[in-house]
Amino acid sequence: MAIAEPLAGNAAAAWLASDSPTRPESYMQAARRRFMHSRVGLVALAVLLLLVVVSVAAPLLTPYDPSIGQPAARLRPIGSPGHIFGTDEQGRDMLTRILYGGRMSLIAGLAPVLVATVIGTILGSLSGFVGKWVAMLIMRTMDMFYAFPAVLLAIAISASLGPGLINQIIALSIIYIAPIARVAEAATRRIVVAEFIEAAKLTGAPTWKILFTQVLANIFSPIFVYSSGLVGLAIVTAASLSFLGLGVRPPTPEWGFMLNALRGTIYVNPWVAALPGFFIFATSISFNMLADSIRDSLDVKE
Amino acid sequence: MMPLVLRRLGMALPTLLGVTLVIWLLLSLLPGDPLAFLLPADATAVDRAKLATELGLDRPLPVRYVYWLFDVIRGEFGFSPFRHRDISELIQNAWKNTALLASFSAVFGLVTGITLGTLAGVYRGSAVDRFVTGFAIVGLSVPSFWVAILLLIVFSAQLRLLPAGGLSNWAEGPGHFFSHLAMPVLSGSMVSIAITARVTRASIAETFRAEFVDTLRAKGLREYQVLMHVAKNAVSPVLTTAGLQMGFLLGGSVLIETIFSWPGLGQLVFNAIAARDLRVVQATTVLIAVTFVLLNLFVDVLQMTFDPRQKRGV
């Protein structure tokens, strides 16, 4: 069964009418071409790839241990010999901790959006497709989560589950399910009235098959655009939870927690204390710019 | 107009019930022994059962929720063994301080955001527009707690201009008062400024494309008079996001208040989390969530007065 591609209809007709030997550009090809031409998006992608590579390859790049420091070398400023990013309050090399910390910060920001996208898409497309009491039940429950300031809800969930990376991911996933489900539901409701869905129903295709092939293929773009826009926010929110002591447990390095731990040293070693925050910011803004380029490339109207 | 406001109020009731239910479920059903920190180390099984009965923990769950809800409505949140105070007393003092900080941040954020957004919307494509658009994406990405720490480093540690934290009374003089507010307000309203500027710019730019603008110009109105008409028509989306931003402000207050030792609800939550004092977390979360729902209700009503079309809708 052919998967309907938005925008492809006219192009295909034009191709059939002409006798051009080349295939018309597909929706995804066009999106990729537009993305390859966006300078901001490419730069953001390069920065993020670099961050991923250096945090994964951290043990190869630095001779120090991220959790063991030298008490004699505490609070060295930026640019010290042997410690270009200085050292923290326990004499641990800051560059090492930033590199290792990137692993936790990236996981804590990306994993919840991924989990929430899967669950939110299932809930949203189901209620948009089935409608009736199913939609009523699912969407009214989602509304309840909208009544909270998101960060506060994440803090409350995290606080009751206790600190730790897994609990932090659960808490953040919960707060992003509702908005994604709304986007998925709205997109599904727009698509279920389309003729090709009607046609699929008339040919006797089972509901689950229509849902997984026809509907999912057509609501992918708006959901992907919305979710990618959430990653930058999730990175900051995850760091906030860690800052409050609700993330990974020390001595494992994580940017948000490091920022809080170094708060007391701003009078003696100020710029080292600001470093972890700079990396949270750089990651978050790169994700936001990447998301903007993806939105423009996929040509989704907000 | 009035019955409509009442209808909107009626819609807020189930939301409020839902909010309390979610918080109650979260903090009552999740793993963890609710009595663990309340009992002395040498407590016997009999002591345990007695305390459980006292707190009503032996009742069935739905009954416990209803009892708890009535306690909340009466403002009875129980006793915090960590702070040796009634939770309602802790909350009352903290709420005032948070309200002070949040309202200054909200006003500052909205005024700055609307000013920047309007400038960018009017002078589209200019250097001002590029600056505001760039500033907005930075403001949306920057962690408020990092801005707070940067401000502390510059103004408190390096220049020694502003106090590193704490609260000041109006009685101590306006200079003293505002010097304590400056950094928490600036760092806390960063997101507000960014969102408001972005939405205002988009809304103003969109409204300028409407046909009535050509009519106004054709009638010979001055440009600032045209802007007044445009602004009035562009205000609705800005208001919609204003309610949303209160969520960012209230949620972000946990971090900002902790960093600046501001004795509000946020700091109360932070200390309660560190002590695993879940009853305080529960009470504070309920209070902030209810405040958020009511603020959004207020924004909706305000919007109906600005935009008569919405009176027919709902």
Image (cartoon, coloured by chain):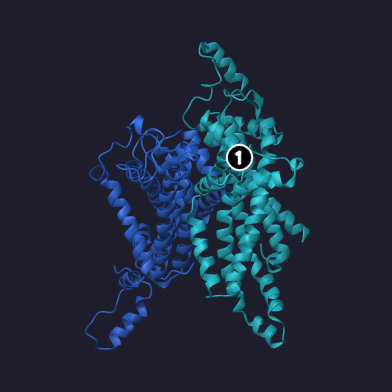
Chain colours: A blue, B cyan
Question: In the displayed structure, would residue A276 be above or below residue B141?
Answer: above
**Residue A201 visible in this rendered orientation of the protein:** no
The residue drawn where x is 50% and y is 57% is B140
Q: Is residue A144 visible?
A: yes
Seen at 64% across and 23% down, the residue is: B84
Residue A87 at x, y percent in the picture = 37, 39
Residue in the image at 52% along x and 29% along y:
B276
- What amino acid type is highlighted by mark number 1? Gly
Compared with A105, B51 (above or below) is above
Q: What residue is drawn where x is 57% and y is 24%?
A: B57
Residue sitting nearer the eye, A247 or A60 = A60
Establish if A117 lies above or below B77.
below
Left or right of residue A201, residue B185 in this image: right
Q: Quadrant of the N terminus of chain A?
A: bottom left
Query: Mark 1 — on which chain does it sit?
Result: B
- Find numbered disc 1 in the image and state the secondary structure of the residue it sits on: loop
Asked whether, in this view, residue B53 is left or right of residue A35, the answer is right
Q: Which sits in the foreground, B116 or B46?
A: B116
Viewer-closest of A112 and B249: B249
**Residue A77: x %, y % from top left:** 40, 42
The part of the image, by quadrant, that contains residue B278 is: top right
How many neighbours does mark 1 have within 10 angstroms: few (below 14), some (14-19), or many (20 or more)? many
Q: Quadrant of residue A272?
A: top left
Q: Is residue A272 left or right of residue B270?
A: left
Residue bearing the label numbered 1: B165
Q: Residue B143 at x, y = what percent?
A: 49, 50
